[in-house]
Amino acid sequence: RPLSVSEVLDEAEPTIAKQYATQPNVRATMQSALGGIFLGNGDHVRAEQLMREAVASQREYGRDSADLATRLETLGRLLLRLQQYAGAESAGLEARAIRVRLTPGGLDDEAASTLGSALMGNEKYADAEGIFRELVANQRRHPKVGPGTSAFVLLGEDLRRQGRNDEASAYFREELERQLKAPDTDSSAIASTLSYLAAAQGMMGHGAEADSLMQRAYELYASVSPIQFQRVGRGTMLANRAELAARAGDDTKATPLADSARAMWKGTLPPGD
């Protein structure tokens, strides 16, 4: 009988290892590509295994190469996604060291963002801040609104976690201004920045402003698709508003907001409610 797709993928890994046993550079490329397929299929365990094997194969081919840095950065992004911050930090630091030796003064935005986020996840806020400030400086030199979390938001969130909410708010507002000026900014990106700003304002005791910002974010999430993403975003805003009201001692406001959040996540609250 014909093999299923999953069977073909299962057989691919040992086939690659055997067929390219004496060609580690080619083997690394194939392992990385296969890991990407498993990642796309939601199999994080197999994806991580293959990406680690790709790093090992690339090391066998030669150290201090741009290809090894690329394999490490790919692994680091996956580990960050899986919230394995220590592993993501280790891979990111090694990749960064290689890049510095190969191209002094160069800065890869995506790799630096991954490393900084891993450091922040490990609560190494000062180290993360240094990287995020490099990214912000680079973004100011080369203004663009692209995919992924902006350097301004990353730096702002790092500062917020340090309790430096005034500074954090300034970066969130700067990013918001940039997003509103850009013609094709996704509404969910604006809503996300509003929620970061709301969190900082809430920590400063500006409850009314924080609540207003979250209401604006809630409205923007109405245009997000698919519907499950919309419900996650809007439900989160309702839950955050409920928490804000509860901290202020306003249970009459907090309770219905919390109930609405649960209903939104369960899909029982109409999107336009």
Image: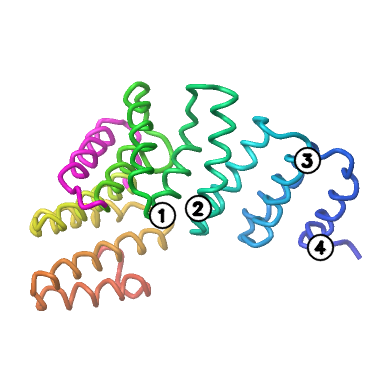
Asked which quadrant contains residue 172, the reply is top left
First in sequence, mark 2 or 3: give its number.
3
The residue beneath circle 2 is 80
Q: Amino acid at mark 2?
A: Leu
Q: Nearer the viewer, residue 192 or 220?
A: 192
Q: Nearer the viewer, residue 212 or 126?
A: 126
Q: Name the front one of labels 2 and 3.
A: 3
Q: Residues within 10 Å of mark 2 (few under 14, many from 20)?
A: many
The residue beneath circle 1 is 121
Q: Amino acid at mark 4?
A: Glu
Label 1 sits on a secondary structure element that is helix
First in sequence, mark 2 or 4: give its number.
4
Label 3 sits on a secondary structure element that is helix
Classify the position of the C terminus by image quarter: bottom left
Image height check: is 253 above or below 147? below
The residue beneath circle 4 is 7
Pinpoint residue 224: horizontal percent, then vertical percent. Answer: 36, 53
Q: Residue 153 magenta-drawn? A: no
Residue 135 left/right relative to 90: left
The residue beneath circle 3 is 60
Q: Are marks 1 and 2 in contact (CB under 8 Å)?
A: yes
First in sequence, mark 3 or 4: give its number.
4
Range shown magenta: 162-187
First in sequence, mark 1 or 2: give its number.
2
Classify the position of the N terminus by image quarter: bottom right
Q: Residue 183 magenta-drawn? A: yes
Q: Are marks 1 and 4 in contact (CB under 8 Å)?
A: no
Q: Name the front one of labels 1 and 2.
A: 1
Determine the residue positioned at 31% across, 45% down. Answer: 187
Between the C-alphas of marks 2 and 3, the distance is 25 Å
Q: Nearer the viewer, residue 218 or 74?
A: 74
Between the C-alphas of marks 1 and 2, the distance is 9 Å
